[in-house]
Image: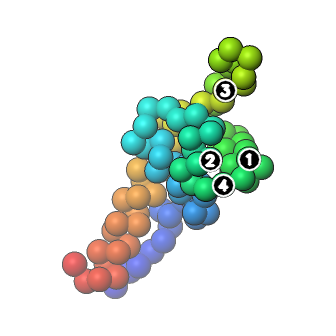
């Protein structure tokens, strides 16, 4: 039985990054405050993980002002969707093999 993990993407091993990508899979875009609240994170923690995902090309951010308040929103890129979908498929395949299904 080959239980290879070669298609598991290390970028998504962090539960924070997994949460960010999961939220973006079901929302076309999501703002910083909503994502912070949803994942129960500090500003710095969320900022560091979104910056890493953005540097990898998996998400993109858009900064704007609404009134006088800054607003940052995030969207998943096409390469991010592909990478995350492949990661989820690899996890699913691993579980099927592990459970003998």
User: Dot 2 surroundings within 10 Å: few (below 14), some, or many (20 or more)?
Assistant: some
> Is mark 2 in CB contact (under 8 Å) with mark 1?
yes
Viewport quadrant of the N terminus:
bottom left
Report the front residue among 34 and 76: 34
> Is mark 3 in CB contact (under 8 Å) with mark 2?
no
Question: Is 16 located above or below residue 57 in the figure?
Answer: below
What percent of the width, then of the height, locates residue 39? 57, 54
Single out the residue that lies furthest toward the right.
44
Q: CA distance from mark 3 to mark 4?
A: 17 Å
Q: Label 2 belongs to which residue?
A: 36
Q: Label 1 belongs to which residue?
A: 43
> Is mark 1 in CB contact (under 8 Å) with mark 3?
no
Report the front residue among 50 and 67: 67
Is 47 left or right of 58, judged from the image as shown?
A: right
Name the residue rendered at 65%, 17% in the picture: 66
For marks 1 and 3, the one nearer the N-term is 1
């Amino acid at each position: 039985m080959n239980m290879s993990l070669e298609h598991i993407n290390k970028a998504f091993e962090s539960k924070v990054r997994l949460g960010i990508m999961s939220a973006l899979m079901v929302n076309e875009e999501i703002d910083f405050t909503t994502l912070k609240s949803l994942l129960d994170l500090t500003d710095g923690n969320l900022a560091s993980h979104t910056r890493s995902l953005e540097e990898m090309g998996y998400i993109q951010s858009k900064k704007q002002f609404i009134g006088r308040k800054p607003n940052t929103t995030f969207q998943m890129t096409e390469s991010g969707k592909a990478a995350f979908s492949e990661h989820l498929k690899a996890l699913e395949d691993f579980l099927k093999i592990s459970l003998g299904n």
